[in-house]
Amino acid sequence: MVLQARNKHREAAPKPPRASRSPLRAAPDAGAEEPGPERAPPSPGRKGAAGRKGPRAEPVAPPAGGGLRGRLAAGLRGALGLRRAGRGRTWTTLLLAAFAAVLHWSHITHLFENDRHFSHLSTLEREMAFRTEMGLYYSYFKTIVEAPSFLNGVWMIMNDKMTEYPLIINTLKRFNLYPEVILASWYRVYIKTMDLIGIQTKTCWTVTRGEGLSPIESCEGLGDPACFYVAVIFILNGLMMALFFIYGTYLSGSRLGGLVTVLCFFFNHGECTRVMWTPPLRESFSYPFLVLQMLLVTHILRATKLYRGSLIALCISNVFFMLPWQFAQFVLLTQIASLFAVYVVGYIDICKLRKIIYIHMISLALCFVLMFGNSMLLTSYYASSLVIIWGILEMKPYFLKINVPELSLWVIQGCSWLFGTVTLKYLTSKIFGIADDAHIGNLLTSKFFSYKDFDTLLYTCAAEFDFMEKETPLRYTKTLLLPVVLTVLIAVVGRIISDMWNVLTKRQTHVRKQQFDHGELVYHALQLLAYAVLGILIMRLKLFLTPHMCVMASLICSRQLFGWLFCRVHPGAVVFAVLAAMSIQGSANLQTQWNIVGEFSNLPQEELIEWIKYSTKPDAVFAGAMPTMASVKLSALRPVVNHPHYEDAGLRARTKIVYSMYSRKPAEEVKRELIKLQVNYYILEESWCIRRSKPGCSMPEIWDVEDPANAGRPPLCNLLVKDSKPHFTTVFQNSVYKVLEVIEE
């Protein structure tokens, strides 16, 4: 057996060269159709928002040859705050970003390996390690990889009868499986190329497990499908850290800002991401493109002239963010709402917002087509919001004719957006007959009121869908992330209040200049508040809040906000003092992660899978707990009637029938419903009958809310654990699982 040494990678924070940025030149007129040329940021010698007498920066012109490529190159130099003469500084910034990417890739790769000893697991153990949704998504990658051809594999997942037997569904449409399709195509190309040139792609060993267990074969290398799949995910999330460095650099105007963003992410790594524990989840593929998308939005808000390349890049990043993850539409809804608020109070002009809305509409239409007409996209709050905002922009001349105070006009536009979005969402859902996202509204309702139903309780009883833990703000405070972000937020809010006061008191002489200088800052402040609301309501969504806090922390280096301080104190001294204080708890957090060492093992499930593979027919249909069904489909290759992807109304109804085994209903009634689903075997887990994450959250208690008529009766699962007859026959049993064969009458 070959043992792999694990090296603990500590991050070495490089000290980048000092760079700074002062505010951008204001747009000449908020309503102008053709604003002035896009300009590079001013030189570091210019200070303060009011100082405009220094030499102006030269316009960033596309290089000779023009076209999209030239514009994108010019845009990149502008995004990094560099002139044509400073290409050396561009390379320095990109090299630092690449270093951050390699550092994060190494960090998450080693955390994943240390936690599961993944390189020494058998194929079956690796598949079992992908629990719940992860196993379901990976099963489609496996299907395409093992198919006779790539196109045949794609056809199989688009005409799938294994996932919701006996229904035939297009899983590519339902489950956002484009990442699996792309990765499977890359894997097949990689294997064929390596075979063609004669390069070995994997190395296999026989691993002795001890304790009377049979030896297993373990293969390591990119030639192993699971290793390839995980490796690509970690590379993508490594590149995400490079984007965070560039993002922090661009937003703050200093590479010190990029350093602050990256180190804050590492110091709060457990609160920022879970990719190292759950690689196949949709967010692992989708979130890096949200970082790119928000960077592009920032660039567009800051630019005085929009190049076509910037808008095309925004459209592409929108598509890449939405395609892998069904939740992306809700995140983009918060972005559109924030941008609309920025427009209403006068920080961006109508032409710029209109172009952004058009890009969002185009990207939504592209996703609708690529998702084979997934109607949830058209009936989403996001789509409704885009239409309503477009309508409000078109009605601007009518709003201007209303003779009311400025504040009242803001309220009118805000209320028009809110009520219009909700109304249009309701009407489109009724017209198309879509109820797939109804559980989202019920979930939010349950957060504020006493509303409860079966589906809502399944969500709220899980810790990740509960309110944010009380310890989370404390952890933010210990690493100084929260105090730094609050300092930045106070500075931004101070600018906003000053601008708003000047607008409301009709002192317009310098308001427009200040407002356009602060537009991207106001957007980021509002986006932070939106993410904070999401994170507080649903703990799982703090994965949006914490990274954005890291980005906002970069503004501690901004001369636009803290130029008054940097006139007296060297900015490097301030930044490194803050980072030194952050590193006290931050290094302890990293050490805690590095100390996590384990080895995956699930012998009861391994016994179950092996029994199913060798003791049941290939077309035997199974039902049971959602996480277990994902493993049965992935590893045993048997049809299942329910699975963990809970975002479909029909699937929720099926799961409710399957979970009636844990209710207090009579056995005969439950059996009759299972026969209607054509179930042959039911996998019963006693732990599901007795476990209770908090009061009211055991399965029998959840069913008491849904089925009060049978409250007080003994749970059916307890009865079947003791004796499964006469309606079921026990055909397999171990310490965790009991397989019941459904006896047909």
Image (cartoon, grey):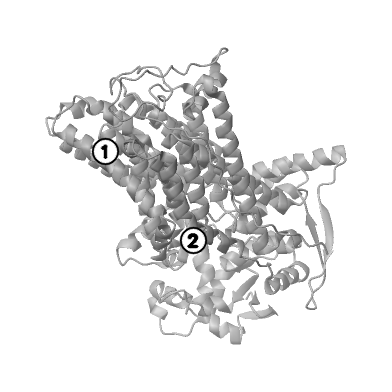
> Residue 242 location in percent, x, y?
56, 40
Q: Quadrant of the C terminus?
A: bottom right
Please report the residue visible at 38 percent of the width from the left and 37 percent of the height from the top. 558
Instruction: Identify which amino acid the numbered label 2 is placed on.
Output: Arg
Distance from the alpha carbon under mark 1 to that under mark 2: 48 Å
Closest to the observer, 323 or 91? 91
Q: Is residue 361 among what the camera can see?
A: no
Instruction: Identify which amino acid the numbered label 1 is placed on.
Output: Arg
Q: Is residue 46 left or right of residue 230?
A: left
The reply to whether callout 1 and callout 2 are in contact (CB within 8 Å) is no
Closest to the observer, 646 or 574? 574
Q: Nearer the viewer, mark 1 or mark 2?
A: 1
N-terminal of the two: label 1 or label 2?
1
Provide the residue designation for mark 2: 652
Task: For label 2, count other residues whose C-alpha is less than 10 Å away and answer few (under 14), some (14-19) or many (20+).
Answer: many
Q: Which mark is residue 203?
A: none
**Among the 4 quarters of the image, the one containing residue 565:** top left
Closest to the observer, 61 or 144? 61
Reply above or below: 319 against 309: below
Q: In this view, which residue lies farthest toward the top?
A: 64
> Residue 287 location in percent, x, y?
52, 46
Q: Is residue 167 among what the camera can see?
A: yes
Q: In this view, which residue lies farthest toward the right?
A: 198
Q: Quadrant of the N terminus?
A: bottom right
Reply above or below: 272 against 362: below
Provide the residue designation for mark 1: 495
> Residue 179 location in percent, x, y?
61, 44
Q: Is residue 392 left or right of residue 545?
A: left
**Among the 4 quarters of the image, the one containing residue 735:** bottom right
> Residue 301 location in percent, x, y?
38, 30
**Among the 4 quarters of the image, the one containing residue 116:** bottom right
